[in-house]
Image: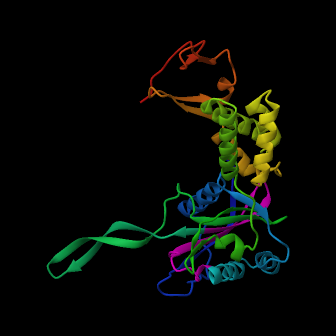
Amino acid sequence: MFTIYLKEAILHIIDRQTGDPVLSEVPLDLANDYIREYIEKKIQKLSSPQTKAGMLAPDSAVAQLLNTYGEQFIELSHHLVNKWYEAYQQSEEAPSCDIIIAKYEIDTIPYLAFLKINFAEGYTHFVESQDQGVENKLILHRAILANKSQKVDEGVLIQLLNYEFQLIEKKYLFSGEKKSYFSTAFIEQVPAASLEENVRVIKQVASKIGKDFDEANFQVVADVKQAVAQSIEENGYIEPEKIAKEVFKENITAQLAFQEQVAEKGITSQVPMISQVKEISEKKYSKQKLVLSNGIELIIPMDVYRDPSKLEFINQPDGTISVTIKNIEDISAKL
């Protein structure tokens, strides 16, 4: 996991019941371990296969704010929240939340994080002194923040040298219509589809073409995952032509049909993904998970799956498939 060096951070409150944001004038104390760890975990969790990426336009409002107030952190955070809230407040369902804005570095490269964390309900105790003695009450708190291991609800990480960004966003109702306001109205830049979205499309197209050519669906899906993992590992991005060759082997007709259909859906060879997302994605796609019809589930490291001396699928005359696991020296059971 990449190491984050936090430099500054501040928290602002967005209470939809009271109206305008409650903007802090004082940064968070990063000398407190629990504050620093909470923010670092939230930043790390934003980078994932669900993350969308892009680059801010130089004339966008956010880019101009970064240029103008780059050295005035508190003032910059106020302007960013106010810009964001102009869009957010128009939603009839968007919830109350806290905004954490932080400046940090990864390998000496400066970043800015804008993290939105929705309020959740939680129970806690409250001690009150009564005439008859101390009373311990159970109360419902409606402004609890998600714990550090959970992803932020929405957020953007901006690399401050070239304004590349990573984005997680949600759709909310605006005048009765679900919209992704964060990219269109706040950072004013529609990002590229996430790795997960692209893989979903690739899987759907490959399954359809595999069916047309009587390919076993489990094999097609497994080969897609293997090809995606290999493409990310070797190239740092998804390469449809290479995936087509890996999945459909010598079937040139199927390869061409696959490339044509994924291109129609907007997937072409992509620019290299951001290093943090690449690192996490390599781990996500490093194993195959197979569920057999008899209830057996197999989780197989990709290098083992690729090695016929360790794993083999055999088509039987009766139409069933046998799975042979080879050269096992030891078996251990884990609870």
Q: Is residue 144 placed above or below 225 in the rendered structure? A: below
Residue 207 horizontal/vertical position (percent): 65, 39
Q: Quadrant of the C terminus?
A: top left
Please state which of residues 315 and 114 is positioned toward the viewer in this rendering. 315
Asked whether residue 239 is in view, the answer is no
What number of labels is visible?
A: 0
Please name the predominant secondary structure of the magenta segment in the image: strand
- Please determine whether, in this image, residue 53 is positioned above or below residue 241: below
Q: Which residues are magenta?
A: 88-115
User: Is residue 42 among the parts visible in the rendering?
Assistant: yes
Q: Residue furthest bottom?
A: 19
Q: How is the image coloured?
A: rainbow
Residue 209, quarter of the rendered image:
top right
Farthest residue toward the left? Answer: 132
Question: For this rendering, which residue is in front, 308 or 112?
Answer: 308
Which residue is located at x 62 percent, y 29 percent? 216
Name the residue at 80% across, 27% down: 250
On whether residue 37 falls in the magenta region, the answer is no
Query: Which percent across, then down, holds residue 265?
Result: 74, 53
Instruction: Examine the image and state in which quarter residue 63 appears.
Output: bottom right
Which residue is nearer to you in this view: 308 or 221? 221
Left or right: residue 246 versus residue 208 is right
- Residue 97 belongs to the span the image colors magenta: yes
Task: In this rendered view, identify the residue nearer to me: 321 or 306.
Answer: 321
The spot of residue 35 in percent (x, y) is 56, 64
Residue at 58 percent of width and 82 percent of height: 89
Q: Is residue 64 left or right of residue 286?
A: right
Residue 133: quarter of image:
bottom left
Q: Position of residue 7 (x, y in %)?
A: 70, 66
